[in-house]
Image (cartoon, rainbow, N blue to C red):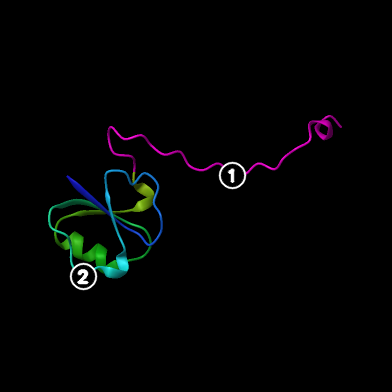
Amino acid sequence: MTQLIYSTEKVRNAEGRVIKNPRHFLAPVEGVTKVYIAGDWPKIRRAYEAAGVSVSPVEEMRALPGRAKVPAPKPDKPDTDPKLDQA
């Protein structure tokens, strides 16, 4: 099973998948079973759907079985002074 991700940016949980830049898309890759797309690339979506391949937004992508899921980065927490919290 081969899964592709089309994205112009770094993608979390991409382990075990191939990442391609959508700007260089010419035609669907043979043997692909699932495609994830980051952004609006209707030409890519239509081409893979016409080939019978499932296409989803990258936001719906999950870690592959047997692969550890990369946790979402936590927002930076401002340093607090415990003395100020006692007020």
The x and y percentages for residue 2 are: 19, 48
Q: Is residue 84 magenta?
A: yes
Q: Residue at x 27, y 48 (%)?
A: 17
> Residue 67 — which label?
none
Q: What amino acid is labelled 1 in the image? A: Pro
Relative to residue 86, is residue 80 drawn left or right?
Answer: left
The x and y percentages for residue 50 are: 16, 62
Instruction: Tell me the CA gap for discs 1 and 2.
Output: 38 Å
In front here: 28 or 17?
17
The residue carrying mark 1 is 75
Q: Residue at x 36, y 58 (%)?
A: 38
Q: What amino acid is labelled 2 in the image? A: Leu
Relative to residue 57, is residue 85 drawn left or right?
Answer: right
What is the quadrant of the N terminus in the image? top left
| Magenta-tinted stretch | 62-87
Main secondary structure found in the magenta portion = loop
The residue carrying mark 2 is 26
Relative to residue 63, is residue 71 drawn left or right?
Answer: right
